[in-house]
Image (spheres, helix red, strand yellow):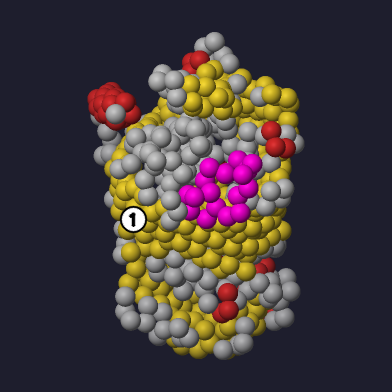
Amino acid sequence: MRNRHAAAGIVRWLTAIAVAAAMAAPAPASGLDVSGSVSGERTVFTGDALHPEQGSGSASLAIAPEVYHQWESGPSLIFTPFLRLDSKDGERTHADIRELTYLKVGDGWEMRAGIGKVFWGTTEFVHLVDIVNQTDLVENIDGEEKLGQPMVRFSLVRDWGVIDLFALPYFRERTFPSIEGRLRYGLVVDTDQPVYESGDGQHHLDFAMRYSHSIGSIDLGLSWFSGTGREPSLLPGTDTLGQPVLIPFYELIDQVSLDLLMVTGQWLLKLETLHRSGQGEDYSALTGGAEYTFVGLGGTPADLGVILEWAYDDRGDTATTPFENDLAAAVRLVLNDMAGTEMLAGVIEDIGSNARIVSIEASRRLGDNIRASLEAYIFADIPADDPFRDLRNDDFLKLEVTLFL
Amino acid sequence: MFSFLQPLPSAAAADGKGLAIAREADSRMDGFADFTAEMVMVLKNRHGQESVREMRVRTLEVAGDGDKSLSIFDTPRDIKGTAFLNFTHKSGDDDQWLYLPALKRVKRISSRNKSGSFMGSEFAYEDIGSQEVEKYTYRWVRDETLSGKECHVVEFYPVDSKNSGYTKLVNWIDTAEYRTWQVQYYDRKDSLLKTLTISDYRQYLDRYWRAQEMNMVNHQNGKSTTLTWSKYTFRTGLTDGDFNRNSLARAR
């Protein structure tokens, strides 16, 4: 119940901010641009739950409105709250401000303040260097859903590249499933008692800097981050009732990273690499690979992309990521039809343990404003000592229907 | 990208007159500086079912190279906010990036898929990209009257024959203003694939002609796509700074 109260609190907060923003705004030159989406979701797990609290499936509803306004003098404000209700997992029922950003653009510079989201990186499977926003893990185990990050961001845009400076004044904790949720560790991660290395806790001021540039067929990004790491170490502990749980421990880290992409003909070559200190021993990690696109498959308008990537972490089995030496392959089929039908089928396999995750995702439009998607995950041949062992019975099928407004 | 400039000339042209016509058509587009416009694309399948895509386009003329353009999609709603940045080049592959708003991700994409369908329409990427003179060689065939207008009929042969979907394009270009009114596309087997009919030209800044309506009919699959352009505005003051990965990621 605690989380439902927390969610209600956040919603009230969101509403207050929206009202305040609307009232503080100078007389709008043009009206507010309101859009957004509502989606319904049904998940069915095909295997028996490993833990008695977990169910065999869930239903869920998410709303994500977007309000945008640009003043005649140039600056703009975007507000994107998010709310999810989940029938089974109290931690998955959550609200967030994905974005609440004031943007001012000058000649050769951009300034953003508020809550925002940025993405760094080039690869498809493992997003190694993307560190500014925290992962909203309860949304999707692919880790691509992110929580809004409070930030002030200044960008200097020049012929020789772009320099982004970030001040990140507030830390967002990673979300984890509750005891009722599937797709979790054997022990629940207790998000009520996070531990921070910094004495300032969530209020430690993090900094990041990035240089990025496109030179002909090459895009590159060189980044530095200093502050509380987004990826917690999970330590054994007990909750308030004395039950064993995992305690998320957020270390202070320093990280430098490089991301590269090169286009050559129908090939895309991708690389991401980082060096991090502060989370145990210093370590390096790398992911990279290639994508090739076959255009006009068999005389049809369809395109077929083939992706092969490798992920490596020099900590080996002690890595905080399960992808310490893994190979991933996928095919992406884009039909280029009226309904915008797309399919992505992939497999990621641990080179040491042969544990395999297979995922298939297909989607298409129904009419003009609805998109339906079907997602399937299979956790195959997971050995008892693999980081994914607790997901071995969590094969699932998820149907999502999203209405865009 | 979607500037649909009048076709331009090429150094390797086998035929002096064809090349001269292409160069003249191109030179009449010189100096437009930049423009913005809105476009509605209506896709129709052989059963008559329709699907609509709306987008806004900004284009910048680049001295000595192909245009830069930024396109922002408004519908279908599921791709609202998706934006596409294209640097066309007179020779070699174009540079292209796609912005995916849900992930806030700017993705480099391969521009080699010239023959690929644009947004599921009957227009290929190479049909809507900026038509640089250097991208074709030319042969003048004849002059003839098309719908009451005296036209040069000129065959265009793609220079990048390996990646183009066509062996040739037959263009009807009027002799008075060098505007293209009709294009026939021949596929790699040299059979007639598509016919583009262009209409409702309007003149801007007392010089630049732009068509408001383009209808592409695919003779082989029975589908068609109509592009309707509106709100052309020239010399809006766009600069290089409006066409980079940063401006792509904040395009509205």
Question: Which of the two residues, B76 or A214, is positioned nearer the viewer here?
Answer: B76
Location of residue A399 (image quadrant):
bottom left
Does B232 appear above or below B242? Answer: below
Q: Can residue B77 be seen in this view?
A: no
Q: Which residue is drawn at 46% across and 74% down?
A: B122
Residue A320 place in picture, x, y as percent: 63, 33
Does A201 appear above or below A212? Answer: above
Residue A343 place in picture, x, y as percent: 50, 63
Q: Name the residue under label 1.
A: A401
Looking at the rendered structure, the secondary structure element under dot 1 is strand
Does B197 appear above or below B237? Answer: below
Q: Which residue is drawn at 44% across and 20% down?
A: A242
Question: Which of the two residues, B174 or B72, is positioned nearer the viewer here?
Answer: B72
Which contiguous range is marked in magenta?
A: A378-395
Amino acid beneath label 1? Val
Say left or right for A275 vs A123: right
Q: Can residue A277 be seen in this view?
A: yes
Chain letter of disc 1 in the image: A
Q: Residue at x 73, y 70 (%)?
A: B11
Q: Residue at x 51, y 37 (%)?
A: A185
Residue B119 place in picture, x, y as percent: 46, 65
Residue A402 place in picture, x, y as percent: 33, 53
